[in-house]
Amino acid sequence: MANSAIEVRGHGTGDKRVARVDMKLEVVVIPVSNVDRAKEFYEKLGWRLDADVNGEHSRLIQFTPPGSGCSIQFGKNLFGTNAAPIVPSAAQSLYLIVSNIEAARTELVARGAEPSEVFHCATGYACRFPGNDGRVSGPAPEHGSYASFVSFRDPEGNVWLLQEVTTRLPGRVDSGVTSFASAAGLASAMRRASAAHGEHEKRIGAADPNWPDWYAEYMVREQSGEKLPE
């Protein structure tokens, strides 16, 4: 839609209609035509296999991407043989968030996937979806958070979209909770804090003996989308 406005909301909107009971997305279900083929593909990607259940007329496998709090279930006849048949159709642009887009792409290639090149959008973000123009090769300038992508397909035609996120928009995370999904994610955050702290020491013209506190403050603020320390 031309000239459309984008409204960004967080928990601090004051809207009493916003639900306050925690609801965490746990599982996404994707019907597939060939369960064994899907299982082989995602095992090669290094995703954790949580379950492989054979019913009399059904089959379910569950995988969890590294560091993800949400799992993916693939299968056939998952809703019973008496239910209306569900014809598998390709899901488009299922998001996987990463902290280092190039490293994530390199791992996909090493594990046998065929990802796109890293790209960003010339204007807006529409180019991340298949069929839209405006893709520019390479990561976004200065690796702007939310702006660099890689896509790949599984054997069923499901499209996954890797998006590089290093700093969350305000209100997108609980400012009282700081967590990292993996050691790699924590290390990446520490490297960004280290680089920023180097600039901080240049500004104050001396070594900062309280660098652990500064690192911690930087990493907490970065993850919650707050103003970064100087």
Image (spheres, helix red, strand yellow):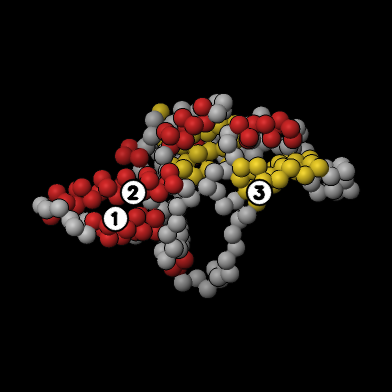
Q: Position of residue 120 (x, y in %)?
A: 42, 35
Q: Disc 1 designates what residue? A: 215
Name the residue located 87 percent from the left edge and 42 percent from the top edge. 57
Q: CA distance from mark 3 to mark 2?
A: 31 Å
User: Which amino acid type corresponds to the residue marked 3 in the rendered image?
Assistant: Val
User: Is residue 152 left or right of 182 when viewed as pictured?
Assistant: right
Q: Residues within 10 Å of mark 2 (few under 14, many from 20)?
A: some
Q: Which mark is residue 136?
A: none
The residue singled out by tag 3 in the image is: 28
Upstream in the sequence, badge 1 or badge 2? 2
Q: Secondary structure at mark 2?
A: helix
Disc 1 from disc 3: Cα separation: 36 Å
The crowd level at tag 1 (other Cα within 10 Å; few <14, some 14-19, many 20+) is many
Residue at the limit of the structure toward the left, as seen here: 205
Q: Secondary structure at mark 1?
A: helix
Q: Are marks 1 and 2 in contact (CB under 8 Å)?
A: yes
Q: Position of residue 83 (x, y in %)?
A: 85, 48
Residue depicted at x 40% and y 49%: 186
- Give whichever of 90, 204 is nearer the camera: 204
Structural distance between the alpha carbons of marks 1 and 2: 7 Å
The amino acid type found where label 1 is placed reads Tyr
Q: Which residue is mark 2?
A: 190
Question: Callout 3: helix, strand or loop?
Answer: strand
Residue at position x 17%, y 56% from top? Answer: 208
Q: Amino acid at mark 2?
A: Met
Tell me which numbered mark, 1 or 3, is placed earlier along the sequence. 3
